[in-house]
Amino acid sequence: MSTDNKILLQDIRARITDRMGDIVHTIILFGSRVQGTSAEHSDYDVLIVLRENANGAIEREIYDICYEIDLDRDILIDAKVLSVEDLATLRGKQPYIQHALETGLHI
């Protein structure tokens, strides 16, 4: 994992934990940033897996945190939020989620 990518994932996790407690199970960077096919302004595809199911307010807060990081770093994070429980459902079986789990960088 590149140092920049690791620092980004650690920053996302730290900010979520600071505001919302220890709700994150894992954070996964996937897509072009991991595959080495990204362009200068490619987004960062991030799957945020929570320990428990999230309601709309929790998801919005996580998206707000990612947006703040976007502004701080002049990047674009495309975040998806799921729970560990969601991974066992049809939602968790979607091809992009399976691809993220299998090939992404976990922290």
Image: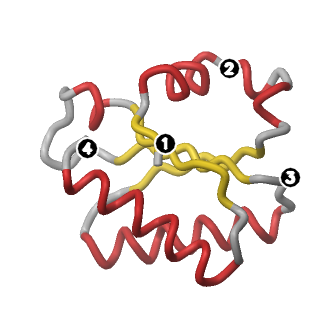
Alpha carbons under labels 3 and 4: distance apart: 29 Å
Callouts 1 and 3 close, C-beta under 8 Å:
no
Residue behind mark 2: 94
| Residue 12 image offset from top left, x and y in percent | 47, 65
Alpha carbons under labels 1 and 3: distance apart: 17 Å
Residue behind mark 4: 42
Image quarter hosting the N terminus: top left
Disc with the residue nearer the chain's start (1 vs 3): 1
Q: Amino acid at mark 3?
A: Asn
Q: Amino acid at mark 2?
A: Gln
Q: Secondary structure at mark 1?
A: strand
Residue placed furthest toward the bottom: 19
Disc with the residue nearer the chain's start (4 vs 2): 4
Q: Residue at x 21, y 56 (%)?
A: 4
Alpha carbons under labels 4 and 2: distance apart: 22 Å
Up-down relation of residue 61 to residue 105 (above or below): below
Count of labels shown? 4
Residue behind mark 1: 28
